[in-house]
Amino acid sequence: MADVVGPRLYSCCKCRTHVALHDDIVSKCFQAKNGRAFLFSHATNILVGPKEDRDLITGLHTVADVFCSDCGEMLGWKYERAYEESQKYKEGKIVLEKYKIVKENW
């Protein structure tokens, strides 16, 4: 069996553009409209849409949808602001929906 070279990655499900590193996962316990989602501390090759307030499961947040910079596929959202003190840790982090990303280099 060959050794894997390089970090484990997540890529866009549509065009396979690299969007995140496995090591940047903060939590795998997030829920999106279409199933599970992962909270990442960083993401790459994404475009951030306009900010808007949304009432989510954990309360009111200012969020912006995030899209693959290559193909434009909507991948999740970025937390811009959390209004409740217990949710402040999410600010600046990105949620990517599990069904919108694929594992690479595993």
Image: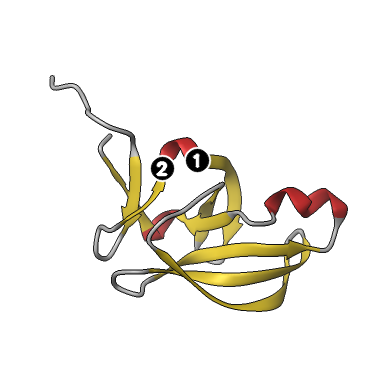
| Residue type, numbered disc 1 | Asp
Q: Observer-nearest residue: 103 or 5?
A: 5
Instruction: Assign the C terminus to one quadrant of the image.
Output: top left
Q: Observer-nearest residue: 76 or 21?
A: 21
The residue lying at 65 percent from left, 62 percent from top is 79
Q: Please give the residue where the numbered disc 1 appears in the rendered image.
A: 24
Count of marks overlaid on the render? 2
**Category of crowding for the residue at label 2, using alpha-carbon neighbours closer than 10 angstroms: few (below 14), some (14–19), many (at least 20):** some
User: Where is 48 relative to 87, above or below?
Assistant: below
The residue lying at 35 percent from left, 69 percent from top is 69
Instruction: Assign the N terminus to one quadrant of the image.
Output: top left
- Taking the image as shown, residue 59 lies to the left or right of residue 9, namely right
Q: Quadrant of residue 70?
A: bottom left
Marks 1 and 2 in Cβ contact (< 8 Å): yes
The residue lying at 44 percent from left, 53 percent from top is 98
Look at the numbered disc 2 and give the secondary structure of its residue: strand
Give x and y (percent) for residue 45. Answer: 37, 61
**Category of crowding for the residue at label 1, using alpha-carbon neighbours closer than 10 angstroms: few (below 14), some (14–19), many (at least 20):** some
**What separation in Å lies between label 1 and label 2 (alpha carbons)?**
5 Å
Look at the numbered disc 1 and give the secondary structure of its residue: helix
Colour scheme: secondary structure
Give x and y (percent) for residue 26. Answer: 58, 41
Give x and y (percent) for residue 14. Answer: 27, 65
| Residue type, numbered disc 2 | Leu
- Taking the image as shown, residue 30 lies to the left or right of residue 19, namely right
Give x and y (percent) for residue 71. Answer: 29, 73
* Mark carried by residue 42: none
Q: Please give the residue where the numbered disc 2 appears in the rendered image.
A: 21
